[in-house]
Amino acid sequence: MRNKITIVGAGFVGATTAHWLASRELGDIVLLDIPQTDTMPKGKALDLMEAGPVLGYDTRVTGTTDYADTANSDVVVVTAGMARKPGMTREDLVGINQKIITDVANNIANHAPNAIVIVVTNPLDTMTYMAYKILSAKGFPSNRVVGQAGVLDSARMRTFMAMEFNCSVDNTHAFVLGGHGDEMVPLVRYSTIAGIPLPDLVKMGWTTQERIDAIVQRTRSGGAEIVNLLKTGSAYYAPGASVAEMVEAILKDKKLIRPCAALLEGQYGLSDMYFGVPVVLGRNGVEKIIEVELNEAEAAMMKKSADLVRGSMSALKF
Ligand code: APR
């Protein structure tokens, strides 16, 4: 039996996620959007299937506006929502996207009650919390609702690290925790080149503290950098690839350790919120939350980031 992966929102992030997933043959894909988009999801789905013979994948891709087609999905990826425009913060989107997430989560609960749900819609931590609120009321445990952010933010930091050290991205490891916003927490001490922590590379004279600080800053504004370059809309290639990695980890039960937005219940001194922390991803979704030791400065950054997420959450209307 093939796995079934539904992507809600057939826009830039949704379609790009479908593209990466199809090429990895991780399962059959359902690409869903709202009725107002008419046959658009069908068009993208057929186009993706027609790439199959060239690339050698047998993935079935279905485009639809009917949730009946998503029945019994193993994984549902939520990219439905409005994307940021230049000058707009992720928090500006709360009101608009809360309505969308509420509609989507109710439909997922009704049609794919056993799915693991990955939320991508921004503001990420707040929208994942919102989805959890709806889904948990319908029986979803918190391990089956997770937000994508840390995989992308860490990928951005790894890109900048590979550029700085002129090395393979395979040699890079980064942990970017906290909320998916300007106060995210790139953990320099836990970020390495071939296992060598960044502070040691400063001591070795391979780089300077100023250049590490610049990498941290560029990571934090990584989303805005793309928004400002694109002029219309926000990033989608790297976000899509990041979701695909999470889907693969879940469906193959890889026990992959990555930072993701997970429900915190006391970890890192925080409760009743979704926040970026290292987790183990496997067939049961978030199988474990890892609490790494933080020094005073790192803990202060986490607190600042959590305060920002709480501020965004306070814009939710129940
Ligand atoms: N149900 C399903 N799909 C919806 C709904 C809904 N209730 N409301 C809107 N959509 C669809 C839109 O019709 C559109 O096709 O979501 C899609 C969003 O696509 P884009 O506008 O291209 O946005 P995108 O760049 O894909 O970003 C989507 O991901 O990274 C985040 O910040 C980003 O929140 C944004 C989301």
Image: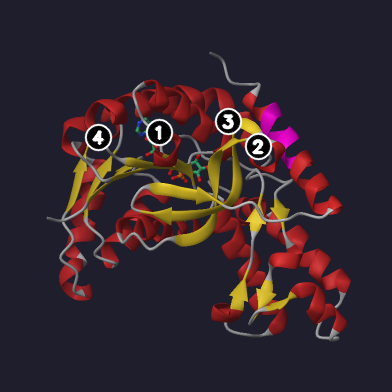
Please name whichever residue, 193 or 55, is drawn nearer the observer in this view of the structure: 193
Q: What separation in Å lies between label 2 and label 3 (alpha carbons)?
A: 8 Å
The quarter of the rendering in which ligand 1 is drawn is: top left
Q: What separation in Å lies between label 2 and label 1 (alpha carbons)?
A: 33 Å
Vertical arrangement, residue 209 with respect to residue 95, above or below: below
Residue occupying image coordinates x 66% and y 29%: 312
Residue under label 2, please give it.
88
Q: Is residue 242 left or right of residue 158?
A: left
Residue type, numbered disc 2? Met
Residue occupying image coordinates x 17% and y 37%: 69
Q: The N terminus appears in which quarter of the rendering?
A: bottom left
Residue under label 4, please give it.
112
User: Quick one: label 2 or label 1, which is nearer the N terminus?
Assistant: 2
Please state the extent of the stretch shown in magenta in the rendering: 305-311
Give x and y (percent) for residue 55: 23, 74
For label 2, the crowd category at 10 Å Cα-Cα, with few meaning under 14, some 14 to 19 and many 20 or more, is few
Residue under label 1, please give it.
141
Q: Which of marks 2 and 3 is in front?
A: 3
Within 8 Å: ligand 1 and the Cβ of disc 2? no
User: Quick one: label 2 or label 3, which is nearer the N terminus?
Assistant: 2
Badge 2 vs badge 3, beta-carbon distance below 8 Å: yes
Give x and y (percent) for residue 72: 19, 39
Residue type, numbered disc 4? Ala
Q: What separation in Å lies between label 2 and label 4 (alpha carbons)?
A: 33 Å
Q: What element carries label 3?
A: helix
Q: Which of marks 2 and 4 is in front?
A: 4
Residue type, numbered disc 1? Pro
Q: In this view, does 115 lie to the left or right of 249?
A: left
